[in-house]
Image (cartoon, rainbow, N blue to C red):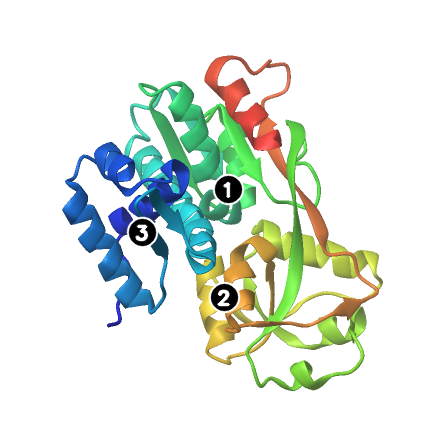
Amino acid sequence: MTGVPDLESLRLLTLVERHGSLGAAAAELGIAQPSASKRLSTLERRLGLALVDRTRRGSRLTPAGQVVAGWAQRVLAEVAGLLDGAQALRTQRDAELRVAASLTVAEYLAPVWIGELRRHHPDLYVGLQVMNSEHVAEQVHNGTVEVGFVESPRAPRGLTSRRVAADQLVVVVAPGHRWTRRRDPLTARELSSTPLLVRERGSGTRDTLDHALARAGAGSIRPLLELGSTAAVRGAVIAGTGPAVLSELAIRSDLDLGRLVAVPVTGIDLHRALRAIWLPGHTLTGPAAELVAIARR
């Protein structure tokens, strides 16, 4: 039996691990124990794995079940982040806290940060605007949002900034690309002389790569194709259109699953800081200050 496990079955598995009891897990979900048992059996058939040992003393996860439960926790956390992020996007107009974030931050980090903030303030409405780093800075300058999050190589001029997280850019290609057969790392000059799939101008990822190549004395980017989102670039690389340099946050699962291959590179520093930005002379208070504090953890 194949198919994608449903979220409630994954949640049930994590609760069995927590309580050591199928009955307690079922009670927390508000379902009958026979229904819970049937749900777990269906999950085991779908995955082709024995996940739970059922004994008179209770229910205990098998070694495979413990691994799957760990994965399930991450899936559930990502879904919670998705829902909180969607809520923030829906409430832009009447938001009590207005936030702008670059695409990479908005897709992979901001929903988790906003979710944690709303767990402390469940009635708080957060409005999230998603755009490239250059436009985030403009929104902060204009006072349209209280705080922004960018991924630029340098702090935007005329704004207060604080580093909240770190990221690394990775050179990636599709499996079978000639670079996957290299024995030596790619050089910065080879990278700059190769047409790349890139984001549009004003993107933090593109600005970071431009800045890194210039510092390495390797020239500038040669665009093969400009695309308006990280997801579009990622999809084009997977399709074999060409190489790209993308945030590790954006392609971690693709690397794990073998959809993309990371190419080692030498002579260039592709690390970058992710920053919170706000108007100078303003002290962040209330939810805005809490959001930045959460992002820095």
Mark nearest the camera among 2 and 3 is: 3
Can residue 79 be spotted in the picture? Answer: no
At x 44%, y 25%, the residue is 117
Q: Where the N terminus falls, by quadrant?
A: bottom left
Q: Residues within 10 Å of mark 2 (few under 14, many from 20)?
A: many
Q: Are marks 1 and 3 in contact (CB under 8 Å)?
A: no
Question: Marks 2 and 3, Cα distance to the nearest angstrom?
Answer: 47 Å
Residue that badge 2 annotates: 233
Question: Marks 1 and 2, Cα distance to the nearest angstrom?
Answer: 19 Å
Residue 276, image x and y in percent? 59, 31
**Which amino acid type is marked by label 2?**
Val
Q: Nearer the viewer, residue 225 or 83?
A: 83
Judge whether 210 appears above or below 194 on screen.
above
Label 2 secondary element: helix
At x 70%, y 47%, the residue is 272
Q: Nearer the viewer, residue 220 or 255?
A: 255
Can residue 155 be spotted in the picture? Answer: yes
Q: Are marks 2 and 3 in contact (CB under 8 Å)?
A: no
Tell me, for residue 54, which label it has, or none.
3
Of the image marks 1 and 2, the number of the one nearer the N terminus = 1
Residue furthest out toward the front: 56
Judge whether 177 appears above or below 231 on screen.
below
Residue 164, image x and y in percent? 63, 34
Q: Where the C terminus falls, by quadrant?
A: top right
**Which amino acid type is marked by label 1?**
Leu
**Which amino acid type is marked by label 3?**
Arg
At x 52%, y 56%, the residue is 250
Residue that badge 1 annotates: 109
Residue 296, image x and y in percent? 62, 30
From the viewer's perspective, tell me whether residue 256 is left or right of residue 129.
right
